[in-house]
Image (cartoon, rainbow, N blue to C red):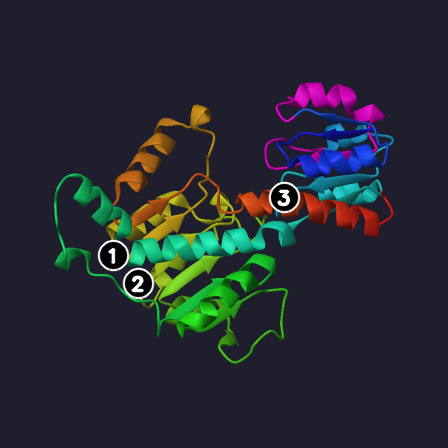
Amino acid sequence: MILVTANTHPYLLQQFAQRDIEYIYSPSISYEEMSQLMPDLTGLVVTTRLRIDRELIDKAAKLKWIGRLGSGLELIDTHYANERNIACISTPEGNRNAVAEHALGMLLCLSNHILKANREVQQREWVRDANRGTEISGKTIGIIGYGNIGSAFAKLLSSFGVTILAYDKYVHGFGGEFIKEASFEQVCRYADVVSFHLPLNGETQYMANMDFFNSLGQKPFILNTSRGGIVHTEALINALNGGLIRGACLDVLENEKLSSQSIEDQEQMAFLATHPSVVLTPHIAGYSHESFLRMSETLIMKLEAQGFL
């Protein structure tokens, strides 16, 4: 029995059905409801809505694999799953292009004042000089995290005539014609744009803190299309107010569940949403029409390759 806990492309369910695999499709299932089903499951498909913790895993005596539609396994206790010989499979190849294109779109939008100018035109204001754009051609782009998505972003940027400084603690040997391997400190010192493409874990949480913002040498644009917890929101706001950065593009926030936001969360979100040098989107970077299908295709391919289907 496979449980699919997320909204998914019909392709995934069709593939299970063609193989006569019994499945339950319940994209709004609660943690408690899922807990009751765990003893009968051999496979589990998730996104970012539910935490798969030790308590759940302990109930899953038959579970062989957990498939993540998208990238980032921070809501899964992967260490304990591995101890139980449960494979944890993510599909960053499925949405890397979508995230990369979204990040580029947000950057172009902000650097050319497109949202601001659009709002002004809607109010019948025709402001030109104050909305003069800044080209990214010739600039230095810092990429922190050079995995599937960071490298896809670099590939898109290659046609803009930029210099890319890329830092990854665990990946090396990727430097080339326009990509230079760099240290974290070099990215902070020289980049006109700093874009985060990292998983959220103990090493990366609040990587963009006040020390980070104080170390920036070029007052860059900050992009985060990875996880909200990588950027400390209070520090980001202080950096905006203090002129340490020129602006920010955020597809993710520390607390994206609006119903559970504290007063402070609400005030911070309102500040960012109305700031003329900030572009916000609701965690949709990796959710294009194409990636919606591709993530399912990638999961099926990996399950087949590992002998689970």
Residue at image location 85% in from the left, 36% down from the top: 19
Q: Which residue is depicted at the point 79% across and 35% down?
A: 16
Q: Left or right? Give the position of 90 relative to 86.
A: left
Image x and y of residue 32, in percent = 68, 19
- Crowdedness near tag 2: few (<14), some (14–19) or many (≥20) residues, C-alpha within 10 Å: many
Disc sitting over residue 219 in the figure: 2
Q: Answer with mark 2 or mark 3, whichever residue precedes in sequence.
A: 2
Tell me whether the residue at label 1 lies in contact with that at label 2, contact meaning CB atoms closer than 8 angstroms: yes
Query: Label 3 sits on what residue type?
Result: Leu
Q: Is residue 47 left or right of residue 99?
A: right
Q: Which residue is mark 3?
A: 293
- Kind of residue indicated by mark 1: Gly
The residue type indicated by label 2 comes to Lys
* Image vertical order of residue 151 relative to residue 35, above or below: below
Quarter where residue 35 is shown:
top right
Q: Secondary structure at mark 3?
A: helix
The disc at residue 243 is 1
What segment carries the magenta color?
A: 27-53
Q: What quarter of the picture does the N terminus occupy?
A: top right
In front here: 185 or 22? 22
